[in-house]
Image (spheres, rainbow, N blue to C red):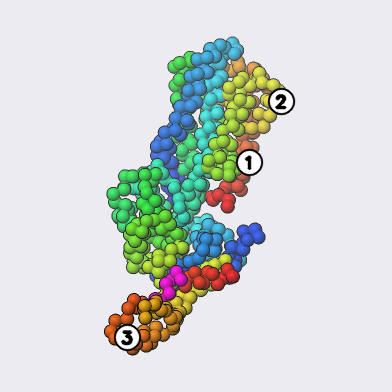
Amino acid sequence: MSKTAVSVRGLVKSYGETKAVRGVDFDLYQGEVLAFLGPNGAGKTTIVEILEGFRDRDSGQVSVLGVDPTVKGESSRLWRNRIGIVVQSTSDAADLTVTETVQHFAKFYSNPRNPDEVISIVGLDEKRKSKGRELSGGQRRRLDVALGILGNPELLFLDEPTTGFDPEARRAFWELIKTLRSDGTTILLTTHYLEEAEALADRLMVINRGQIIDTGTPQTIGGRNKAEAVVKWEENGALREVKTTSPTQAVSEIMSRFDGEVPELQVLRPSLEDIYLEMIDGESE
Amino acid sequence: MNEKLPSLLATGWNRGLIEIRQFLRQREAVVFTLMFPVMLLLIFGSVFKGTIALGVSFSQYFLAGMIASGLVNSGFQGLAVAIPLERDDGTLKRLRGTPMPPMAYFIGKTVLIVVTTVAQIFMLLLIGVFLFGVSLPTDIHRWLDLLWIIGLGASVSTLLGIAFSSVPKNGRSASAIVVPIVLVLQFTSGVYFIFNQLPVWMQDLASIFPLRWMTQGVRSVFLPQSFAVQEVAHSWELEKIALILGAWLVVGLILAVKTFKWERDR
């Protein structure tokens, strides 16, 4: 097993009467991309902000790159030098150009990446001289990512990075994240887009009402690999369907009744979204 | 992992440079901060041409008041409005997430305030001298007095601005809360009106706050020494000014450190 980048045990956090995080345990391994999934208000952002050192916890143990995120002073600076944070929607640095902003933030780190290269990596070459206020939502998010990866982080936090993107911008953004992943950056991603989690993450963690309700790969989470498939076909002029855990056998039985092609034959595996919605639903009963 | 992080001073200085660059790109802010006091001086100086005591014109009195209130404008008002805006737009959260030492943010703000304040004072003096016949002091001690009064006054104003930045709920409401406070202080502290002509209760109230002492201190520099007897205490009270501003400095420092919020309450 590879080394842990993040380790969380018994994490609890309340805001007044509201229990936002109710006992969470998990590990994130080096080089892994872990996605947090969950409805709004599930506690995802609270957990991530505790890991990022933005928020205090009520109880539990948290270690991020071997450091407690509540660390203060010079140790805090050394720790922040090793992590990258892409926070939720911002509109800062509106009067500075992309180049100015990236160059300025590079001056905070001990060993920053080359600002020009980072601008190219996130695909903002054409926008170097544009001010923050002139960027589109997607370009703005790319700038956020540029600032997040600028310090050569060992661990990158991505909080709902593609909210408000059009599908094309989202695909382009995924390619960027895949490049970072192949460079060995450990990434903790929160999202409520399931295709995004499926495309990017090695492992998913579904969070609802402050607890982890399941964890697994995109293929196995929620028992997806063992879930019933639906076989649909047309027989005697009517659409028929069966739910089965052995679709191959079902198809072979159906085939035996036909001479050649089975009309309208489909085998449907549950999508990640089906599995996810079932998990979230079952919880809120 | 023993890589060397940039020093606090270098980072603070870089913050200062970027603050200045951003400030200069916000035309409204430049006009409001730098030109507004100059405009006021031009208007008041042109309307009230009389003298208020032997050898003391109203323009001279007003110039001193405008210099002092310039410290409050760029320090207190500037920060109490800008910080809530930067809290809303994510500037503070983003900086907090980097290895930037938090103190560098405040050093950057201080650099910006020093630069805008010096520019403002320079313009006011220029207009005062060339248009309204204000004479500059020739005694080096007066200039040294000006230095500590401005230094102390600007520090108090900066710290109170940082402290007050936690009061507005959001950036949009900030100037609506802060500007009236500054205006009331200016009217009661000897900027727009001559302080010794105000009702005693108003003088007493204004004396709680730093601006009244800052205006009196600046008057001691630019008004003839003979005017001292016209002050409420018949003296410039420089020691008392230093003491009161020093006390506010401590209060401001404690409040700023205790109340500063990197994020909006949710």
Name the residue rendered at 46%, 63% in the picture: A192
Indicate whether A152 appears above or below B43.
Answer: below
State yes or no: residue B93 in magenta: no
Indicate whether B121 appears above or below A35.
Answer: above
Name the residue rendered at 58%, 29% in the picture: B183
| Amino acid tagged 1 | Val
Q: CA distance from mark 2 to mark 3?
A: 103 Å
The residue range painted magenta reads A267-274
Viewer-proximal residue among A184 and A137:
A137
Question: Nearer the viewer's eye, disc 2 or disc 1?
Answer: 2
- Residue A208, can we see it? yes
**Coordinates of residue B219 in the picture (x, y in percent):** 57, 22
Q: Secondary structure at mark 3?
A: loop
Which residue is outermost to the right? B201
Q: Which mark is residue B74?
A: none
Q: CA distance from mark 3 to mark 1?
A: 90 Å
